[in-house]
């Protein structure tokens, strides 16, 4: 192999770097980070590995990745040897149907043949060390039982960070592999459920890319492959299917994989390659059972609005259309001999827009992103030790969402201190977007003329401190700022409002919005906030139309479940429950579970009883249970609204379903995901 120049960034890499604002100084320095000669440290690292992910191109130019096991319990010739001159000798036993081995068989290896390109990424899952290399395969021997011997010569070497790597210890083992899907040669765009399950459990994935210009006269150093590890919480790679049409009009299903981009070293080597060449390969090893899913496909990077459209709150992602796949059950001769420890850098799983819609979790603001609105903190009111209401003055009037709707706030202007590659103290900050959603816990007044809620320039949110949470605690702790005067008040960007959960629905005629005549409201803890605002809305409509045709009539049963001093939220509510007209009925059943803060819980209970002795309130100092749903009057006539933590949601859903046979109209929202 002739000696290459040091790495030259190609158009694809430069384009992604530009999109993502990689500083110029870094762009210029990148070739210096990529060593032509294998550093000694890397050589020792590779020699000590007992498995090595490697990627290669098939005779159609498609990348495929495999995980070569380089340790055997009964064959001493298996292993990785590294010699001077960037040469590596890898001997492994593989499944003869592994795509990697099939490519070696189909290819007559020739140094001038672009198919001999390879890329590898050494990962030691026990300690998160990772180094990348690429070059060419100079010789290979494959025997019929699947033993392979590869001679690799590498000319690009790069050390990588430990971010997003799951810690696990792996030991060699011998499994009896069985191929359950073989679409290596033939095109497939569909994956069976077993493959999707493998993708869904994966926290460690390998992505192979290539940069092979079509122009055959290109000099060697413009052609290479890349292989890297992609990690995250299980489920970080999302899958969706779409119906597409052949030229002759026949419909078929295409499967897409979606990989959100997590903050990295800003070189964008893999994404840059994809920008230049859409063919990619992936493996999804299931370390718990040894199953291996190999995928090849066509990838596209989506930026900004296009990314957001597919996956809300993500500004860069890669969408891969599956074109080939092989699924080998028990195909990996490694077994896990420890528990898995996920990386503290893993951001929460990001879901597809269509998934969020299905889960009722889509909290997209409906004010266009170019309309810039500021929100200034003007007052705070403490409701419990950990819950306060924060009121913000907006820089202009907006149409308020229906009561129960939410506002989206952007704290990046005051909290984002810029890019950091690693953050050992607070690893979650590395992918933090500083955007949070809260229900607007007050309702606007109601206009008799327009029969609509009036536009507002003030919004309130009622926020509970989340243990370890970034922004809820910042809001609570930083409220002193506002006390020092309007000049220093906290000011942030308001991104807009939206609504997914409300008892108000638009009336097609020029009448006021509709509200169901009978409702069951079920709230848990801070999940009470939409009900605060819906109740406000009902009172505001009632005061606009105290009587007559437009007056509102509804009957509500409210079940409130709270812990310790959460009853403070009810205090605020009960102060708005006096002298109701006959047309509005409400009965409140509160369940107070007591944790370690029993005295706080008792104080909140005593205060409530003392302050509202004549309210329509019944309190029990215990957890809510199945039987509490049995005594609800006219249950079958009620529309149900449910918002709270997962356990309460589950209990309510199960109880209501068994009582009503799934006949009830149920609306739900969850903040806890
Ligand atoms: C529609 C809706 C209404 C909500 N209303 C309330 C409310 O009235 N009161 C209340 O206390 N909490 C509410 N929440 C929860 C709230 O958004 C925050 O998750 C909570 O305040 C913790 O924030 P944190 O920064 O302290 O915690 P962190 O742990 O630092 O952040 C929470 C994590 O969740 C992610 N995240 C936060 N919001 C969203 C979102 N909308 N979509 C996707 N990911 C997200 C963040 O990126 C972050 O990683 C609501 C959430 C939703 C989706």
Image (tube, helix red, strand yellow):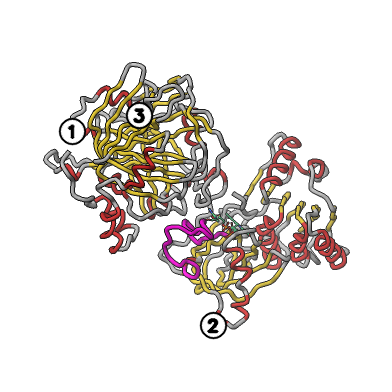
Q: Residue at x 49, y 25 (%)?
A: 173
- Quadrant of the rendered image containing residue 575: bottom right
Between residue 466 and residue 160, name the one nearer to us: 160
Q: Farthest residue to the top: give it.
A: 144
Of the two numbered discs 2 and 1 in the rendering, the one whose residue sits closer to the viewer: 1
> 538 left or right of 164?
right
Q: Earlier in the sequence, mark 2 or mark 3?
A: 3
Disc 3 C-beta below 8 A from ligand 1 = no
Any part of residue 591 in sight: yes
Give the residue number, with chain letter if any, for mark 3: 324
Per the image, label 3 sits on a secondary structure element best described as strand
Between residue 299 and residue 295, name the one nearer to us: 295
Marking on residue 111: 1
Q: Residue at x 62, y 51 (%)?
A: 672
Give the residue number, with chain letter if any, for mark 2: 487
Quarter placement of the N terminus? top left
Q: How many other residues sit within 10 Å of disc 3, few (<14), some (14-19) or many (≥20)?
A: many
Q: Residue at x 49, y 70 (%)?
A: 414
| Alpha-carbon span between mark 1 and mark 3 | 27 Å
């Amino acid at each position: 192999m002739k000696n290459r120049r040091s790495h030259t960034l190609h158009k694809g890499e430069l384009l992604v770097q530009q999109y993502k604002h990689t500083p110029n100084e870094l762009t210029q320095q990148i070739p210096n980070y990529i060593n032509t000669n294998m550093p000694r440290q890397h050589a020792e690292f590779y020699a000590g590995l007992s498995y090595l992910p490697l990627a290669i191109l098939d005779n159609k130019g498609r990348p495929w990745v495999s995980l070569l096991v380089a340790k055997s319990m009964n064959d001493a010739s298996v292993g990785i040897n590294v010699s001077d001159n960037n040469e590596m000798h890898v001997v492994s036993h593989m499944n003869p149907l592994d795509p990697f081995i099939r490519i070696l068989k189909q290819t007559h290896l020739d140094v001038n043949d672009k198919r001999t390109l390879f890329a590898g990424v050494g990962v030691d899952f026990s300690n998160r060390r990772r180094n990348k290399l690429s070059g060419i395969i100079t010789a290979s021997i494959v025997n019929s039982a699947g033993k392979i011997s590869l001679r690799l010569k590498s000319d690009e070497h790069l050390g990588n960070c430990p971010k997003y790597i799951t810690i696990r210890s792996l030991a060699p083992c011998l499994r009896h592999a069985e191929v359950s899907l073989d679409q290596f040669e033939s095109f497939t765009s569909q994956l069976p459920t077993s493959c999707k399950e493998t993708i869904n459990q994966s926290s460690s994935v390998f992505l192979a890319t290539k940069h092979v210009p079509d122009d055959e006269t290109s000099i060697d150093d413009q052609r290479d492959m890349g292989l890297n590890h992609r990690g995250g919480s299980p489920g970080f790679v999302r899958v969706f299917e779409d119906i597409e049409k052949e030229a002759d009009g026949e419909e078929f299903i295409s499967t897409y994989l979606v990989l959100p981009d997590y903050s990295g070293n800003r070189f964008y080597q893999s994404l840059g390659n994809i920008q230049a060449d859409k063919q990619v390969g992936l493996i999804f090893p299931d370390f718990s059972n040894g199953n291996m899913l190999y995928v090849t496909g066509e990838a596209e990077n989506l930026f900004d609005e296009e990314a957001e459209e597919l996956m809300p709150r993500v500004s860069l992602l890669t969408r891969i259309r599956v074109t080939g796949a092989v699924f080998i059950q028990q195909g990996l001769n490694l077994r896990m001999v420890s528990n898995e420890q996920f990386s503290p850098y893993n951001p929460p799983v990001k879901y597809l827009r269509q998934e969020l819609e299905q889960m009722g979790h889509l909290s997209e603001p409906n004010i266009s992103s170019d309309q810039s609105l500021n929100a200034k903190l003007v007052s705070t009111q403490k409701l419990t030790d950990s819950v306060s209401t924060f009121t913000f003055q907006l820089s202009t009037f907006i149409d308020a969402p229906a009561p129960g709707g939410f506002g989206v706030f952007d704290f990046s202007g005051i909290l984002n201190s810029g890019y950091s590659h690693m953050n050992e103290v607070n690893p979650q900050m590395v992918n933090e977007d500083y955007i949070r959603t809260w229900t607007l816990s007050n309702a606007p007044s109601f206009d008799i003329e327009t029969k609509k809620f009036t536009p507002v320039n003030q919004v309130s949110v009622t926020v509970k401190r989340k243990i370890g949470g970034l922004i809820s605690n910042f809001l609570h702790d930083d409220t002193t700022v506002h006390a020092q005067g309007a000049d220093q008040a906290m000011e942030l960007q308001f991104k807009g409002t939206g609504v997914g959960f409300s008892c108000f629905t638009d009336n097609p005629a020029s009448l006021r919005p509709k509200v169901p005549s009978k409702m069951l409201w079920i709230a848990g803890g801070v999940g009470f906030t939409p009900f605060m605002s819906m109740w406000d809305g009902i009172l505001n409509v009632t005061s606009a139309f105290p009587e007559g045709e437009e007056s509102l009539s509804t009957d509500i049963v409210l079940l409130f479940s709270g812990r310790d001093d959460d009853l403070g939220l009810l205090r605020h509510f009960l102060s708005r429950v006096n002298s109701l007209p006959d047309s509005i009925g409400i009965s409140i059943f509160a369940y107070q579970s007591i944790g370690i803060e029993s005295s706080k819980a008792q104080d909140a209970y005593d205060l409530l009883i003392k302050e509202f002795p004549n309210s329509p309130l019944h309190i029990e100092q215990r957890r809510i249970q199945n039987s509490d749903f049995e005594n609800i009057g006219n249950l079958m006539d009620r529309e149900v609204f449910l918002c709270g933590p997962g356990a309460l949601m589950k209990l309510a859903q199960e109880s209501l379903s068994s009582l009503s046979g799934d006949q009830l109209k149920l609306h739900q929202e969850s903040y806890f995901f």
